[in-house]
Image (cartoon, rainbow, N blue to C red):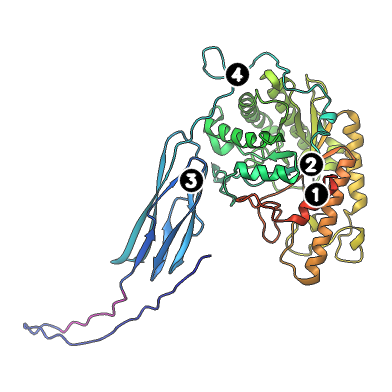
Amino acid sequence: MKQLIFFISLLFASSFLVTACDDSDNNVDTERAEDITLEVQPVSLNFAAEGGEQTISVSSNSNWTISFSSDSWVKPDISASKGNVDVKIVAEASDVEEERTVVLTISAGKDDNRKDIEVTVTQAARIPFDEPENGNENGDEPAEYIEPDASGMRDITAVEFSQLMTVGWNLGNSLEAINVVDGVYSGGETSWGNPVVTQQLIDSVAEAGFNTIRIPVSWSHKIVDETNYKISDSWLQRVGEVVNYALDNDMFVIINIHWDGGWMNHPFYDNQDEINNKLKALWKQIAIYFRDYDDRLLFAGSNEVHVEGNYGDPSTENVEVQNSFNQTFVNTVRATGGRNVYRYLVVQAYNTNISYAVNYMVMPSDEATNRLLAEVHFYDPYDFTLQTDGNYKTQWGEPFSGGDVSSWGQEDWVDEAFGMMKTNFVDEGYGVILGEYGAVLRSGLTGDELTQHIEARKYYLEYVTSAAIENYIVPIYWDNGYAGNNGFALFDRQSGEVVDPVALEAILSGAGISN
């Protein structure tokens, strides 16, 4: 806990007349403030390549600030305060294969009565992981194509495969964390407030009962050559490290291109070629890097592609262009050969909307047979699941029909929507992924209102999970790591401990899992 101790500056003022020997004009001293004090401990920090958090203690009798670059890999949790404060310093996982150093400057006072103390922060170099063993015989860059390899790839249909996945969890707001300012990409794993992902966290998720994990990933902030969209080797390695955390728990894993600054959210004919070119370049690299992984790793081409800022019905142009993105993704992955010839691939409906999937989605042609899955998301009704201002709703479902419930989006809509996905996709031989669903926990409510909300949310999560599974759909709960009011967190991202046992129980119960 941060404790602030404020010092009262005592000003001593005394005016006196100084008579000079040469009879010059009298001089009057101005009031002088107490000298500024500033102490910082420690003044050097050393981080491992994986990043993490450390603390410095700042003590001063004045206001003080910490100077740092907004795009730095290391940041304090506060940039200004007064008195005595413990400041958390957060370092991102390193994406460079050499040691790096940054200096933070803590300053108190101003002008002649100013003190500065520098804190040197050093991070170890990332140790390269073993590269995938699919390069050419000279050991250079991996071959763009290798002969098909069916080892480790089950010979079952996409629907049969999806039924092995039971229930999943999203590692949200971590590897997809990205900042875009004036077209410049920056950010990293911790830049949206979550700590570095650890094996301990993923172990906890698996131990809780989840056997599937969806890992949203951004890539554009790690492009090192814009001319060919070359992704940093160290970022591919870091994503691979987190994937391995899950595979070590024998989980199914989905990685994607997730928002990524929104460069795909321009589904117009004028943008089609440019977007497809970048999509092909990124997926070619991702597919080659992960080519030797077995079928527990799935690729998903995109996430919630739509016209930026417009959540209404798409035009014919919008859906045709977005469908082309799915085709480019499938073609690119298959063209890398190896196990990717047989890998299960996930393609999304326009804005992952169920109605749009049924009405507009054209599944890509695929040289592999029965290896495609369709992805949709479900946050209905919005005023119960996501809305945080205005006339939001705190309850849902038949047991709460006399209370604060929405006028639509109740059990009948869940059954209808998931039934449409079964009829139009599952029954046609395509697996279906409910890539995201959930409802915020409105923990800011009080008394009976909070009690009723918790019970209604529990009912919602259990009902939606159960209805998905009954319709052969894989439910994957959205967790953004935030456990405060209007958060989704099931687990503490630092310790892995369960922070919302009621929601966890509801999801597992809906999936028929006892824990």
Residue 344 in picture, x, y percent from top left: 76, 27
- Residue at 91% x, 46% y: name it: 415
| Residue range corresponding to the magenta coloring | 26-34
Residue 495 in picture, x, y percent from top left: 61, 51
Q: Residue 464 colored magenta?
A: no
As rendered, which of 64 and 503 lies closer to the eye? 503
Pointer 1 residue: 507
What's the CA distance linking mark 3 and mark 1? 36 Å
Q: Amino acid at mark 4?
A: Asn
Pointer 3 residue: 73
Mark closer to the chain start, 4 or 3: 3
Residue 51 in picture, x, y percent from top left: 51, 44
Q: Residue furthest left?
A: 22
Pointer 2 residue: 167
- The tag on residue 134 is 4
Mark closer to the chain start, 3 or 2: 3
Relative to residue 336, is residue 424 drawn left or right? right
What's the CA distance linking mark 3 and mark 2? 35 Å
What's the CA distance linking mark 4 and mark 3? 32 Å
Residue 153 in picture, x, y percent from top left: 75, 22
Relative to residue 295, is residue 380 drawn left or right? right
Question: Circles 3 and 1: CB distance less than 8 Å?
Answer: no
Number of disc labels: 4
Question: Circles 4 and 2: CB distance less than 8 Å?
Answer: no
Question: Circles 2 and 1: CB distance less than 8 Å?
Answer: yes
The crowd level at tag 3 (other Cα within 10 Å; few <14, some 14-19, many 20+) is many
What's the CA distance linking mark 1 and mark 4? 40 Å
Q: Amino acid at mark 3?
A: Trp
Q: Dot 1: what SS?
A: helix
